[in-house]
Amino acid sequence: MFARVKDVALLLGRIGVAVVFFAHGLQKWDGGVSATATMFDHVGIPLPTVAAVFVIVLEVLGSVAFVAGFLLPLIAIGYAVDMAGALISVHAQNGLTGNGGYELVLVLGLAALALGFNGGRLSLDHVLFWRKREARIPAGELETV
């Protein structure tokens, strides 16, 4: 029973993180690549147009994949890079808390990493990749893998 609760909790965590990224991605999508690139250029992000396309695709399509549990480590690393860029270029100067602080980007980036490398059994990654591996490993050795 604990495994089922853990898997549901991991799914809910992925949904929560993905919803926030998706909402911010839609804001950038609505503004357009050019407006997002202009904002990125203004805050000093290198290759602003490339970064804008990367972030919009990651935050919109990556969020759908994150909820489904598909390519979780890849999406999680993308989210962490996205949040590291936001922290360094925009939020660090405002401190941890308060107006414009970096607490949200810090938590989002780290939570995405934690969930991306432990997505649980309610994920496409588990169905497509891990279930086959678990079938080949004897039950007693599964704990150490």
Image (spheres, rainbow, N blue to C red):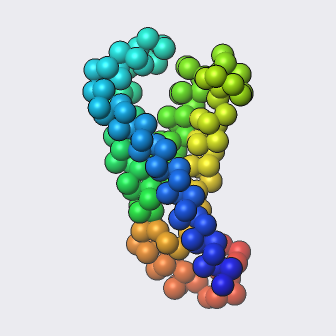
Left or right: 25 in relation to 4 = left
What percent of the width, then of the height, locates residue 66?
Answer: 45, 55
Q: Residue at x 49, y 78 (%)?
A: 131
Q: Position of residue 58 (x, y in %)?
A: 39, 42
Q: Residue at x 47, y 50 (%)?
A: 18
- The location of residue 48, given as percent across then percent down, is 37, 20
From the viewer's side, name the closer residue of 142 and 37.
37
Q: Quadrant of residue 10?
A: bottom right
Which residue lies at the image location 38% right of the left edge and 54% below the top edge? 64
Query: Image quadrant for the C terminus?
Result: bottom right
In the rendered image of this protein, does residue 34 appear above or below residue 19? above
Q: Is residue 56 visible?
A: no
Q: Quadrant of residue 119?
A: bottom right
120 vs 33: above or below: below
Residue 107 visible to an observer of this rendering: yes
Q: Quadrant of the N terminus?
A: bottom right
Q: Is residue 139 above or below residue 44?
A: below
User: In the image, residue 116 lies at what x, y percent?
Assistant: 54, 55
Q: Identify the residue shown where x is 68% and y is 79%.
A: 2
4, 138: nearer the viewer: 4
The residue sitting at the front extreme is 99
